[in-house]
């Protein structure tokens, strides 16, 4: 990471450090995807690329389904709008996940790789977000400054972001794989997956303002439990 120029103000130096942290988030996120995929490949032999692709496609379909909700709440205060969109993600994602395991993938290995594909494409999306935040921090127009203030209020601009982002993606990936396995085992569990998924999202949004370590501990706990139950179900 390049050192800030000596004539920079304290705010400028802090901004450059934040931009550096956003950039260093990327290799950490990529490492999570590679390591998780590597572990699954060693355990289950060659990846089922069809299932990986279907899982990734499922996540993108769920993202599209949330778009009308985001459009409807666009004029609300940003905090309320974020909560509504987060609440909608549980029903959208779990409905699509249920259809995925009912009609497109079957068998432990294929379901496992579909869950990985779901998690991996979300990691790609998070990488794009990190690069977008880096670009945003380099701008000084009022709209960009307003977006920065919102990110700061949410606790998303930190110098230790690379470490927390990697942990968050690992935890979320375990959750996605676990939920995919559970719904393939007992489709009616979608009735539990929807509220649990929504509760995790909403709790994370609120806890993040209080304590990022506490937030990540909560997500990690849910992810580990979901993954463990998913493995035990087969």
Image: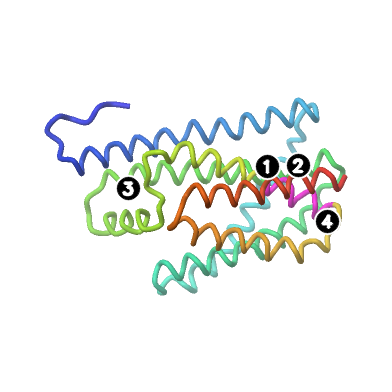
210 up-or-down from 217: above or below: below
Q: Quadrant of the C terminus?
A: top right
Residue 200: x, y in percent?
61, 58
Circles 2 and 1 in contact, beta carbons < 8 Å: yes
Q: Residue at x 29, y 59 (%)?
A: 146
* Separation (CA) of disc 4 from disc 2: 13 Å
Q: Residues within 10 Å of mark 3 (few under 14, many from 20)?
A: some
42 up-or-down from 114: above or below: above
Identify the residue position indicated by label 3 in the image.
136
Q: Which is more N-terminal, label 2 or label 4?
A: 2
Identify the residue position indicated by label 4 in the image.
102
In the picture, the disc for residue 106 is: none
Identify the residue position indicated by label 1 in the image.
117
Relative to residue 20, is residue 4 drawn left or right? left
Secondary structure of residue under mark 2 = helix
Please report the bounds of the magenta region as a residue range: 174-184
Q: Which is more N-terminal, label 1 or label 3?
A: 1
Identify the residue position indicated by label 2 in the image.
51
Q: Which is more toward the observer, 218 or 88? A: 218
Q: Which is more N-terminal, label 1 or label 2?
A: 2
């Amino acid at each position: 990471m390049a050192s800030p120029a000596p004539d920079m103000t304290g705010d400028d130096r802090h901004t450059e450090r934040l931009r550096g942290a956003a950039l260093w988030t990327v290799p950490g996120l990529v490492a999570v995807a590679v390591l998780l995929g590597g572990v699954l490949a060693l355990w289950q032999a060659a990846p089922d690329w069809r299932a990986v692709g279907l899982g990734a496609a499922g996540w993108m379909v769920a993202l599209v389904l949330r778009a009308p909700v985001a459009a409807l709440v666009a004029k609300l205060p940003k905090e309320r709008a974020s909560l509504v969109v987060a609440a909608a993600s549980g029903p959208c994602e779990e409905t699509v996940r249920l259809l995925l395991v009912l009609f497109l993938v079957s068998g432990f290995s294929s379901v496992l790789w579909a869950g990985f594909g779901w998690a991996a494409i979300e990691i790609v999306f998070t990488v794009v977000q990190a690069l977008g935040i880096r670009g945003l921090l380099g701008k000084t127009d009022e709209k960009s400054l307003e977006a920065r203030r919102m990110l700061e209020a949410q606790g998303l601009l930190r110098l230790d972001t690379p470490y927390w982002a990697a942990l968050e993606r690992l935890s979320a990936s375990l959750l996605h794989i676990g939920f995919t396995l559970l719904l393939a085992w007992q489709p009616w569990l979608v009735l539990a997956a929807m509220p649990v998924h929504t509760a995790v999202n909403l709790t994370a949004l609120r806890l993040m303002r209080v304590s990022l370590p506490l937030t990540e501990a909560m997500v990690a706990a849910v992810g580990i439990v979901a993954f463990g139950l998913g493995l035990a179900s087969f």
